[in-house]
Amino acid sequence: MILTHAHLDHSGYLPRLYREGFRGGVYTTPATHEVAGILLYDSAHLQEAEAERANRGRYSRHDPAEPLYGVREVEAVLRLFQPKIANEGFRLGDLTVTFLPAGHILGAACVRIEADGKSLVFSGDVGRPDDPLMKPPQPLPSTDFLVLESTYGDRLHAPVEASRELARIVVETASRGGTLLIPAFAVGRAQTLLQLLAELQGQGAIPELPIYLDSPMAINISHILCRYQPEHRLDPKQCHTLCGIATYVPDSEISRKLSRDPRPKIIIAGAGMLTGGRILHHLESFGGNPDNCLLVSGYQAAGTRGRKLLDGEHRLRLFGREIEIRCQVERLDALSGHADYRELGDWLSALPKAPRRVFLTHGEPQAALALKDYLAERLGWQAEIPSEFESVDLSLDASGEV
């Protein structure tokens, strides 16, 4: 198993695979190994707690409700990890594998695989050239085949300065006497938000509201970030400021007390797509008041609560019941950790020569189709969009000829 980065949409099924019999090695970067451990343990705890609540409240479709996996499977699968340094190729059977920094989150990497004189690159999730936290994705070497993400293949990020837009939202929420809720991914997004808020407070651009980091994962990852300083843009002083700007919320009982506190404040909590975590009980408490604000700061997958709110829905199902959402809902696309189609084009245009074949994955259908058209127009590449579970013979070209 080769793992590009720690986000749960990439790593989150590993413990379940272990439960189902997987015993192979998991190859990834050292930072991803550390970050994945934190995310997977948290995921297991959340699933176990949610199953227990569902069985108590009898609101699950399953009887009994069971987690996909538990802490025991996480402990076991983490023992299978074999961290490898970026830009240092290693042998895996007949393959030579190299991780190339992708700039998406801490530890994220593209994967280059070489065998029999041919090369294949999996982009993984590709970061942005001007991300406030992460360094830009490393230029790719020549490759025969490229598997490319297309998350934002149909979108250009708004040319809005993230700090200015964040300042506006904080000031407007504070002027109403409201609480600003920011669902954030524990890896990358939470740290970027803390850094921007620290800068804005230092400049006097926002009022000095209490800031709470209500995510044990984000707290731990903020400390890990400082140990991998060469992989991101922050210097040691900025890391220290980032770790000191917020009050850390260590346990769920204090988190619930925070939900009952009516005073204006900023709460950063997981999960980033409102799929679980402590942000849900904050939304339950503060979501019904139009003076409060929910700031969506990252990609929201189809079917998630975050996407439903962005699509204009005003009722969400939380803890087995329907909740009406009356708070303001804002969106801050400028903090996205995924390159848009123009940024992908800029990154790919530095390739010494075009790949023989390009496959677009990791995107909704309209995004993949839009990126296919863009690559054809800008670079003259005829990309392919494989169907689910499709097998591809790389000894053949796109027309089926050798």
Image: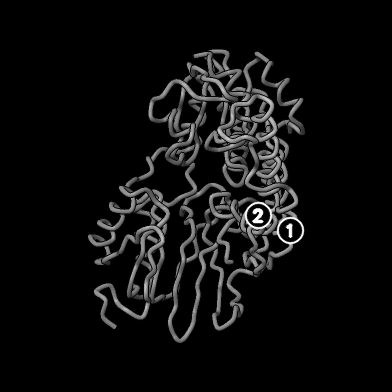
At 33% from the left and 53% from the top, the residue drawn is 368
Nearest the viewer among 301 and 75 is 75
Q: Can residue 199 be seen in this view?
A: no
Q: Could you say whether the residue bearing mark 1 is in a helix, strand or loop? A: helix
Quadrant, the N terminus: bottom right
Extreme residue toward the front, this view: 63
Q: Is residue 227 left or right of residue 151?
A: right
At 42% from the left and 52% from the top, the residue drawn is 339
Where residue 261 sits: x, y (%)? Answer: 69, 16
- In the picture, residue 392 is in which quadrant? bottom left
Extreme residue toward the bottom, this view: 116
Q: Could you say whether the residue bearing mark 2 is in a helix, strand or loop? A: helix
Q: Which mark is residue 218?
A: none
Check disc 2 and report the residue beneath it: 15
Q: Disc 2, disc 1: CB below 8 Å? A: yes
Q: Can residue 71 be seen in this view?
A: yes
Name which residue type carries label 1: Ala
Colour approach in the figure: one colour
Mark before the other along the chain sequence, 2 or 1: 2
Quadrant, the C terminus: bottom left
Q: In this view, does 243 lie above or below 261?
A: below
Nearest the viewer among 103 and 281 is 281
Q: Residues within 10 Å of mark 1 (few under 14, many from 20)?
A: some
**How much space separates mark 2 and mark 1, taking CA atoms?**
8 Å
Q: In this view, does 338 lie above or below 357?
A: above
Q: Residue 76 carries which label?
A: 1
At 56% from the left and 73% from the top, the residue drawn is 98
At 48% from the left and 33% from the top, the residue drawn is 306
Q: In this view, does 242 lie above or below 144?
A: above
